[in-house]
Each structure stands twice: as C-alpha cells, then as structure tokens.
Image (cartoon, coloured by chain):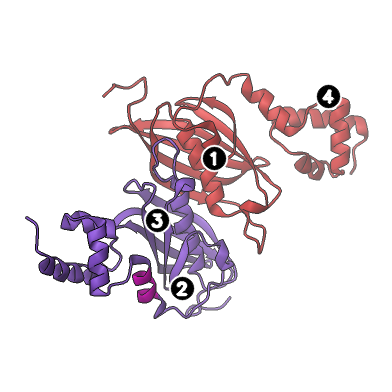
Chain colours: A red, B purple
Amino acid sequence: MKRNKKERQSLLKETIEAKPFITDEALAKSFDVSIQTIRLDRMELNIPELRERIKSVATNNWNETVKALPIDEVIGEIIDLELDKRAISIMDVTAEHVFSRNKIARGHHLFAQANSLAVAVINDELALTTNADIKFTRQVVQGERVIAKARVVGSEKNNRTVVEVLSYVDNETVFSGVFEMFRSTQEKEGNES
Amino acid sequence: MKRNKKERQSLLKETIEAKPFITDEALAKSFDVSIQTIRLDRMELNIPELRERIKSVATNNWNETVKALPIDEVIGEIIDLELDKRAISIMDVTAEHVFSRNKIARGHHLFAQANSLAVAVINDELALTTNADIKFTRQVVQGERVIAKARVVGSEKNNRTVVEVLSYVDNETVFSGVFEMFRSTQEKEGNES
C-alpha cells in the first residue's frame, strides 16, 4: 500500500529522527519509492543528507583531538570523539576495499577501520593492540557506508584498556570486535605509574 | 669470546640448517659479528640469501594454485601452498605499514597478511572470514620480514573451516590467529552439500 505524499513525508521525518544514520537507499526500500523521491522529500522537509546529518550530530560534542596517532593515519573518517570514552568513524566501501570477484569487502579493511578507531579513542601518546576477538556478522559490498562506533568498556591491570567496536551498515551490525589495547600510562582516572 | 673463522662458518652452517628462516641480521647478532661478515661467510659456504632459501624449501612442494581469490589480492608473497592443509607467505615491513611516529607495524597489516593467507589456503571459489581470535605477541618494526604460516586445523558443520595462522620474525612469534572461514562447499574429504 503506497502512502500519499503527506503521510510519507511525515513518517520519513519521524524515521530519520529515530535513526539518524539511515541511508537514502534504505529509506527508499522501506517506503517502497525511488531514491530520487526520498531526496526530493528531504529537500522539501529541509533534512540534510546522511553525511551532513552524522557530522552535525557528532561535531556538537567533538572538541577533542586524537592523541595516539596522526589523524590522517586513521582508517575512515572520524566524526565523533571523546577520548577514553567513545568514537565514531565512517568509511565508504569502494573498489579498492573489495574482492574483485564478488565485490564483497575484504575483512582486513573492516578490521582496519575498527582497529584504528580503537587506537584513536585512547587518551595516550602510545596505544598498541595486544589482542582482539572479532566477528564478521554480515557481508558488506562495494558502495555501502560503514559506521564504526567504539566504546571504552573497561581498563585492566598492566596499562590495558578494553575497547568494544561495533560497525553498522544501515543500522545492521556487520562487524563486532573487542580490542585489548596496551597504552604507555593508565587512564587519567586510574593510578599513574 | 669470538670464534675463529672456521669455527664460525661451521656453526653458521648448522644454525641455518636448523633454522632456515633466520635472517642475516639475527645471525650477525647471535655470532657477534657484522652483517657483512655473515654475507661473506654465506658466499664462501655457498648458502643462498634468506628469500632464496625460503623459496627453494617451499616451491619443491608447491604445485597448487590459489582458488579463493586472485593471487595478486593476497597480502604478502605466497611461497608455499597445499590447499586445505597449509600455506606460507612472507611480507617485508616497509614505511607504508608502520605508524609514522614510532615505526611500529600497524595491526591491520599483520592481520591482512594472516587473514588473506587463511582465505588463500581454502580449496574453494568462495571463502569468507566469519570470526577470528587474534593476538599481537611482539612489536614488529619497519625493515623486518614477517613469515606467516597457515594450517587448516579442522572443519566444522555449516561449511566452516578453522585455520590457525602463526606469524614470525626471526623464529619469534609476533602474531597468532585462529580464523573461522565460511566456504561455499565442504572440504573434498567431507560430504558435498
């Protein structure tokens, strides 16, 4: 059953408010209309495109700087960061990231985005991965946009910090990883050694 | 205590026979002589350089072809392969693989070498990583050569194959990983589905 334009635009607004990271493609599929229709709806409703939405949500709170590595060595684009707490990055999957044969994203690129975000979130000049437990839960293909969210979930003895990273395409989990990071000093809350 | 040349060359020959993957740098350190001395000793003893040694050991048994991906999509250079059994690759760590700040190899490059070897060892047109449990056991720095060895350790239900990868620099473990791989069909020994 197709909705009329007014109903659709009202529901579209609600949906984007609830899921700010949803793509035009996913909206088009869910509303059973063309991507072009979604774009026109967004323009009429004055809703910016996904990348702008993510940035505007994120940069409001982002006044920190990556410490553990130069920002251009982060894989993906960091759009939110609170050191020793959480970080978000986005990566567009292009031809260089996929197997030529089936256009499926290669595991090490998803790993690289997540791992470098786990490094970037650490509030220390030195952060190195000691081990990781990772899962690839859904195939990602060329053209998709992966949003990785890192969260510091705990710190252990011996200057170790545990970071959980979940990566999504259209709100669906495609990768999850728990990274144990070595750092040169304890978190600021902890004892300095 | 320095050995005389004859003693040193005799011991050098034994050492290389026992550890064919040892580098000239490691030999020089262990014999407390310069790298140049080791090179001259090798020339006099007619022992080829490391890369040639690895290749000659490996290619004797290597008459198989990578199936799961084009060989140029493997990260590192495959020097030995027996499908659904084992594989070896080498990767030289250069400036593009390290953090600019401390010249330590970035985790995702070691992961990429190991993961693509785990893909390459699978005797199937399609092989995808579903999960992995990995450890970075020693820092690797620019200029070092990483030798990754993959071994198929078991196959599970649902077209899953478990591959263990151990990566070494100078016989010291720098990375270990257990990769669970999804493939489109069971191994040849198993039931075809």
Image vertical order of residue B54 relative to residue B28, above or below = below
Q: Which mark is residue B84?
A: 2
Helix, strand or loop status at disc 1: strand
The residue marked by circle 1 belongs to what chain?
A
> Which residue is drawn at the image coordinates 12% and 69% (left, top)?
B6
Check disc 2: other Cα within 10 Å, few if <14, some if 14-19, many if 20+.
Answer: many
Q: In the image, B125: left or right of B30?
A: right
Q: Amino acid at mark 4?
A: Asn
Work out whether disc 3 and disc 2 sit on a shared chain.
Answer: yes
Tell me, yes or no, whether the two marked residues, 4 and 3, touch with CB atoms within 8 Å.
Answer: no
Q: Amino acid at mark 2?
A: Asp
The residue marked by circle 3 belongs to what chain?
B
> How far apart are the alpha carbons under marks 1 and 3?
20 Å
Work out whether disc 4 and disc 2 sit on a shared chain.
Answer: no
Helix, strand or loop status at disc 4: loop
Q: Give the residue number, with chain letter if any, for mark 1.
A: A166
